[in-house]
Amino acid sequence: MKSTQLHIMVAGGGVAGMEAAGTLAEMGYRVTLVEKGDEPGGHLLQWHALFPDRRPAEEVRSYLRKRIEHRNISIITKTTVEKIRHHISGLEVNLSGGTSEKADAVIVSTGFDLFDASRKEEYGYGIYDNVITSAELEVMFNRGRVAKADGTVPSRIGLIHCVGSRDEKVNNNHCSKVCCVTAVKQAIEIRKMLPSCEVFCFYMDMRMYGPYYEELYRESQEFYNVNFIRGKVSEASVNINNRLVIKVEDTLAGRPLKMELDIMVLMAGMEMAASGMKLAEASGMKRGINRFLETTDHHYGNNLSGIKGVFYAGTCTAPMNITDTISHARAAVAETVRYLNGR
Amino acid sequence: MNSELFTLPFNLGLYFILIYSVVRSTVWFRDLSRPDKLRLQRGFFGKPFMDSLREIFSESLLHRKIFSKNPVLGYMHMSLAFGWFLLIVFGTIEADFFSEKHLNPPSHAIFFRWFNPEHGAEGFARIFSFWMDLLLAFILSGLLLAIIKRFIPRMMGMKKTTKHTWTDRIALISLWLIFPSRLLAESFTCGAYGSGSFLTGNLGNALASFLPAAEMAPWFWWLYSLSLGTFFILLPVSRYFHIPVELFLIFMRNSGITTGDRHSSYTEVQTHACSSCGVCISVCQMSSAAGIHDIQSAYFIKGLRNDRDIAAITANCLMCGRCEEVCPVGIELGPMRLIERRQGERSDRIMKLPEKYSLSRKRGSTEKILTQAYGYLVREEPERADVLFFAGCMTHLTPSVIVAMKKIMDSAGVRYRFMDENGGVCCGRPLMLAGRDREARELINHNSDMIWKSGAQILVTSCPICYKVFRESYYLEARVMHHSEFINLLIEEGSLRLGYLHKKVVYHDPCELGRGSGIFEEPRAVISYVAELQTSSQESNMSLCCGGSLGNLTLSSGKRAMIAADAARTLTLGSPDELITACPLCKKTFAQVAETKVSDIAELVAAALPAPRAAKAKTRPPRRAARAVSNG
């Protein structure tokens, strides 16, 4: 069978889905990209700049947009994939509108949800005005103005690492990998935007695992005077001047610490997307201990679902940065083609 | 037919157990503290004594409590206990009535049929014989259930039954043998003499038709006597010691003796009064939700009785109190576990049999001597206020509760001071639950000082954990109120104007507030005032533990989540709009697992407040809440 006649569905139009769809289309396959939002792009749509080099997120966005401008790709938005099931002539994919499509293979790239920070009630997200998430800070960067809820300029901002990551109490034992370096990047951006505003990062461990991450961390201290305090914030409250008061233990100095902040930024971690969980539940896809999709082998089968014709790409399998997501999506394409050729 | 040699095992056993019981009771009495001695002496006259007799009749003999929980299990206990009791009473009457002599030795009554093989032929004696056979049949029916329970516990509605030690097993076998051997012994004798009523007579005739009844009978009388004797001699070292000890416990409890905070005769008596019935195992969420089957109170008490190393069992408990609620014997299991936590570790050793008979056990005190642990706490001069609000450290982790309480108190115009707004000192309860009373006492003294100096008349707390310790371990002039009680007071006195929320909600009783402090009605009154309150299958004194308990420092997060998810599922069976609780810890625990929105009672009430009309409330200075206290 010629490849142009083969149809591949991609569930989720974030970074992984767009890259996978683009690569497949380029190879001559007919691709349908299903996206639950108004347009493809995923979480990247909200982002201002990317680590480690602080390049504008728009550069990667426009790369991905071009990637899916291809006559072999049709895009369905405001739709989710509900269920994948085997059919005599291949796979049948049920969509949220009640329609269904036939496909020869499916790439699942449902991605992640940002951890709902109100589940860590002790940080006061949703209760105190000036407690925001890292994603909301990024929106502020996009608007070009970082300010308190009442519009005034902050003089001290605290970034709280590991919110919803590495936290047994919220049933998330995993590390979300990208928050440490995002915090460093955001701290630098705050310092550049508001030179008189102090920035404190409260961390458990600094996991600077990627190329140029460590350099960025060093730069933040040497050139931008970002303060790093090793310790987890235990609770937040508001004092009479409507400033946030946080309690934290400085575990390097070995003593408790109380600090006033104008804005507290919660570095919300990654969780398996709710839409992906529903799909997995309905289609019999296995999930691991941290609820992400389980691949058949985490070394050499990291795109394989164990279900014939179904492949995984991107953060639906584990937290990843953009670099790794793109590589993972291309690997998923390779596995898909190998499967189609071997049929 | 008058050799009395076979009565020897029975007589030995009986006199042994009688003398042993008297001596052991005396030792226990001797070891009581002076006030408890006085209580017990006073308890022997007047109402407590009558109460005890009534309780012994309804619980030790009829087993009413077990009956109400599980009728089949109740019948089993009743037929064995009450049936045996009646058999002894009427056996004694029979022996006394139909013998030439009066005041016969007990063996004469027990082995009446042996001494009077032809008795019961006619008239009144015939009716009496029938009655005695009926009692024996009654007991045997209970015994049949006991055997079924041992081998197929599920048939008796029990999830689990307790595991036995070897002395328990021998005692159990001898207990099981008593009544069948009596049946056979009497039947053979009746068969040989053509006497007996519907049971022994008919069975005797049937057996005599193909067996030499007269030769067989002595063997079974021997067996009957031997099993009675063995049972009595093993009684003090087996679980069946609970039968006589429970009587002693009832007298002690009705005299007003409580467990207190260290080992005493009373804890010894409670330890031995446990029948290992296993009712506590069935209600334990650690078992039903988290798959932990070896730490329940029955095992804890057994370890205590046999002086085993039970540190792990002692520590691994939610301290929710559900087991204490259902214990048919009324053992204070929570306080008992706390005493053991204070005790620290004990070495694991197998007790030799003679040791088990020893009259009083000296449990080594390993209480650690510590220098002051909280010397660094700064004593402040508190502002004076009518109402003092103490959020507690758990509430600081649920700031929405604090925000809601501030709104409510401002709206009602309460003049209050927020005692731990900038961080306070722990109430001491977590340390107490961990068995560290000495350290807890330091914190209690610190906080008491602050509360006294503030001159407050009401101390309001949002945390049931703090609430319990404020009420029980602090000496305060201020009236201690949980915020649900305080909000109820504000509603009752008309200080709070509230709208009605069109919501269905279910209420979860926090362990420390409900079972722990007896506050069941006030939260329900408050909730019903602002929303529609659903009922749940597990509420009030049988409410579930949320799994977040501070009483357990060893349980893993995963197991806690299992308990929490199971409890949340049970509570939200009626698909309420919100799951309401009155404890910050319950709220946090449920919020991680429940699909229903979880709120504190204060948040629910705050949501029912009318929209604020610009800072007007602040200028109003009523002191109604404080006045309400002096009025009532």
Image (spheres, coloured by chain):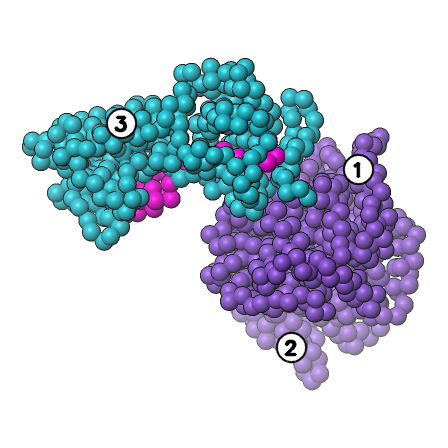
Does residue B625 lie above or below B449 as drawn?
below
Residue that numbered label 1 is attached to: B439
Per the image, label 2 sits on a secondary structure element best described as: helix
Q: CA distance from mark 2 to mark 1?
A: 67 Å
- Left or right relative to A224: residue B215: right
* Same chain for the residues under marks 2 and 1 in the image: yes
User: Chain ID for label 3?
Assistant: A
Query: At 91% from the left edge and 63% from the top edge, which residue is drawn?
Result: B42
Membership of A277 in magenta stretch: yes
Query: At 85% from the left edge and 55% from the top edge, which residue is drawn?
Result: B477
Per the image, label 3 sits on a secondary structure element best described as: helix
Q: Please identify the quadrant where the N terminus of chain B is shown.
A: bottom right
Q: Nearer the viewer, mark 2 or mark 3?
A: 3
- Left or right relative to A153: residue B623: right
* Same chain for the residues under marks 3 and 1 in the image: no
Residue A63, disc:
3
Q: Which residues are magenta?
A: A261-288
Give x and y (percent) for residue A98: 23, 53
Residue that numbered label 2 is attached to: B130
Badge 3, how many Cα within 10 Å: few under 14, some, many 20+? Answer: few
Quadrant position of residue A288: top left
User: Chain ID for label 2?
Assistant: B
- What colour do you see for chain A? cyan
* Same chain for the residues under marks 2 and 3 in the image: no
